[in-house]
Every structure is written in structure tokens, then in C-alpha cells.
Amino acid sequence: MGNFLSVGPGIRNTGCIAIALPKGRLLPFVIALFEGMGVTCLRGFADSRRLICEDPDRQLQFLTLKPTDIPTYVERGAADMGVVGKDQLLEQRRDVYEPLDLRFGACRLVVAEPAELRQQDDPRSWSHLRLATKYPNLAEAYFNRKGIQAEIIKLNGSLELAPLVGLAERIVDLVETGQTLKENGLVEVEEITKSTARLIVNRASLKTKYRKVQDLIEEIRKQVEAHAARACK
Ligand code: PRP
């Protein structure tokens, strides 16, 4: 089990590399990635309420955050590195270096609507839509490109509920297995983009901690490639 750290001023001045990990679906994959590299302090992290742990031998600190906050921590240097979905990077457009596709967490951002509406709907005739989404920037850009006026209602979760209660006719949301859409009577209409988990790095850390950061990126790259090679066998 990793060391518990009290959080306070100066926690970032320890010479460690601080890595922001996303709570939720990606966390078990990220933990498996680092455990494959010999990091042991993350054992039990996914099930605990701890937000920070440390591997003193490797001089690594791990922080767990809401996925949407990871680009902010990394852009501002509160973490040197982070793992986050490409969907969030596209949505937030933060100034971070993105050296690596980690190849897990594959999902798609789609437009979806109730199955009954789909039976009589023709996307080619869309001129004005009211939709709910966690991705207002991506949704707006997508419909702008298509010349469709989109009234966007920003929500933070459980998007599939919005059409069921009349808050919006359609949603723009992530689909991984398709189970949530199916269980709520929604169907996919169009795909906007694909996403996988990415490694991101603070631009200043890339210079000030160059050797440590580059070595870690290479180590993670090898781990990802070894995992992909095993999966192909
Ligand atoms: C995501 C996404 C969908 C669901 C899709 O939500 O927003 O609701 O997962 O996954 P599926 O295709 O495998 O069913 P998440 O679980 O992150 O929770 P949220 O609704 O609170 O955002």
C-alpha cells in the first residue's frame, strides 16, 4: 500500500513526477498499466477514498481526479502528467503535450435519439436541433460544420435521461458498449468522433524535468506496445 500524503503547500516541490489519474472507467486500466511497470502503491487505490499516493522508490506521486479536471491540473502544472480521454482533450483544447495514445478506453462520441423518433427521422433534413450533452464545444462545432442550428443544453451526467423526460430531443454522448443507450430506448444516429485514453504532459515539466519525463514516456510506450503485442497473439 502506498504512503498517505498530507496535502499542503509545497507538495509539488518534491522532485517527484506527479501523475493525474482519472477516476471511473479508465482507472482500472491505468492502474494495470503502472502495475505492469512495477509500481505497487496503486493497489487498492481504485476502491479507496484516498486522492494521492506515492511510490518513493520511483519518485512518483499519483493523484486521482474527475476526468474532466485532468487537463486543468496538467496545463497548470499541478500535475506533471495525466491520463485522460481524447474526447476531453478535443472538448477542452488545453495547452498540453500529448505524446501517447494509450489504446485503452476506446469509445465514440455520437448523436443519439429515442428509437421511436428514429423511425420517422431523417438526419439529412435537420435544420434546428435541441440536444443535451457534456460536450458543448464538440457538439456545436460538429453541427456548425453541417450548417445545423443546435440549441445545446449542457449537462454533467446521465445524459440518456434528457430525451426520456423531454429536456431535449437528442443527446451527444459517449458510447462504449451501447448498453446505456439500449437500456434507455435510445439509438445512435451519427458518429462525431472516436476516443481512446491519452497520456498528456505539462509543457514546462517537459523542459524542467526532461530526462525523468522522457524516460517515463518511453517506459509507458513500451508497456502499451507489449500489451498490444500480447493482445494480438
Ligand atoms: C458514460 C457515457 C454514457 C455511458 C456509455 O457515462 O456518458 O452514459 O458511459 O457507456 P456504455 O455505452 O458502455 O453503456 P458514465 O458511465 O461515465 O456516467 P455519467 O452518465 O454519469 O457521465
Image (tube, helix red, strand yellow):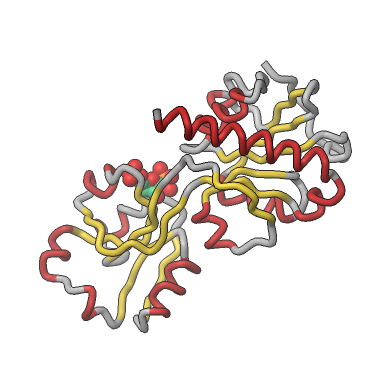
What x and y, as percent, mark residue 160?
31, 53
Q: Is residue 59 above or below residue 142?
A: above
Q: Residue 32 vs residue 15: left or right?
A: left
What x and y, as percent, mark residue 195?
45, 52
Give the image quarter of residue 8.
Answer: top right
Residue in view at x 30 percent, y 80 percent = 128
What x and y, as percent, mark residue 16?
82, 34
Residue in view at x 75 percent, y 30 percent = 60
Q: Residue 162 vs residue 193: left or right?
A: left
Q: Is residue 197 above or below residue 41?
A: below
Q: Residue 72 vs residue 29: left or right?
A: right
Residue in view at x 77 percent, y 50 percent = 77
Query: How many numbered circles does the render carry?
Result: 0
Give the image quarter of residue 190.
Answer: bottom left
What x and y, as percent, mark residue 211?
82, 41
Residue in view at x 38 percent, y 64 percent = 192
Query: Quick one: 194 or 215, which is closer to the camera?
Result: 215
**Which quadrant, please, contains the C terminus?**
top left
Q: Residue 74 vs residue 173: left or right?
A: right
Query: Quick one: 200 or 169, which is closer to the camera?
Result: 200
**Which quadrant, please, contains the N terminus?**
top right
Query: Quick one: 48 or 73, which is closer to the camera?
Result: 73
